[in-house]
Image: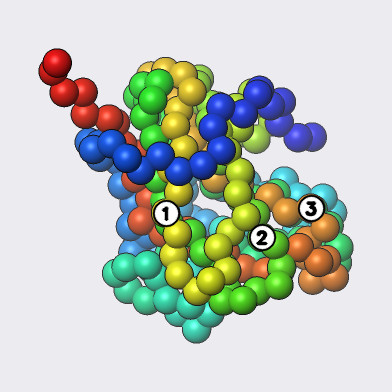
Amino acid sequence: MFPKLKKPFETDSINSLPNIIYYSDSFNAANDTTSLKNRGYKVFYRGTGPQGLTAAWFQGSSIVFPAFNGSSSGYVAANFNAVTSQNNIDNWLILPSKNIVKGDSLFFFSRSILDSRFPDSIRVMFSQTGDSVPEALWTEAGRFKVNTNGSWQRKGFRAPSTGTKARFAIRYNVVNGGPSGINSDYIGIDSLTLERPIIFPK
């Protein structure tokens, strides 16, 4: 069962205004499923078919590519082995609940493998009430194809509403993915922040 979606609020980056950072994760700690959960994340596999050989989200590999900053493996990753054969990938990384105000932003860096021919994609979701399962009511804040030029790319997405225990979520969401699919490879997420715009007096 897939989540109920509201109309998307915004689709891309919003890097122009100075912000106050009130939550951050450099992913330089351990990023296995247990460690992510211990830091307040919710981790879910919601792909079609049985889950594949890898966890939904796991420790980045410096052999595939190095982290944006910190230790070379200090990022969280997901890949085509989330599913078996040819299936749809839908891996959720739900952030800890926070007091989020409309207009606050989630920022993070992402990338895929240099010159990958597989169009990996990410959706960013928002829950005003802090829902902690994918089947609840989520708003899509945006979606994008992950960068394959060999560099980390920063993306930002605004919260469309206010919630005292609201949550953002990052979805590695790929149709026709898996070892026999044609649309999935490997992605990394690094240097994540939640930020609030600074309001200057007029």
Residue labelled with disc 2 = 120
The amino acid sitting under disc 2 is Asp
Residue marked by disc 3: 175
Image height of 12 relative to 165, above or below: below
Residue beneath the point at 65% across and 74% down = 116
Q: Secondary structure at mark 1?
A: strand
In this view, the residue in front, 13 or 135, is 13
**Residue at point 66%, 60% (across, down):** 120
Q: CA distance from mark 2 to mark 3?
A: 9 Å
Taking depth in this image into account, of 202 and 152 the one nearest to the observer is: 202
- What percent of the width, then of the height, locates residue 164? 38, 19
How much space separates mark 2 and mark 1, taking CA atoms? 16 Å
* Kind of residue at badge 1: Arg
Q: Label 2's element?
A: loop
Residue 198, quarter of picture:
top left
Q: Position of residue 48 (x, y in %)?
A: 82, 50
Residue 66 at x, y percent in the picture: 42, 76
Q: Earlier in the sequence, mark 2 or mark 3?
A: 2
Q: Earlier in the sequence, mark 3 or mark 1?
A: 1
Q: Residue at x 55, y 63 (%)?
A: 147
Dot 3: element: strand
- Is the residue 70 above or below the residue 200 in the image? below
Q: Mark 3: give few (<14), some (14-19) or many (20+) Cα within 10 Å.
A: some
Q: Which residue is mark 1?
A: 154
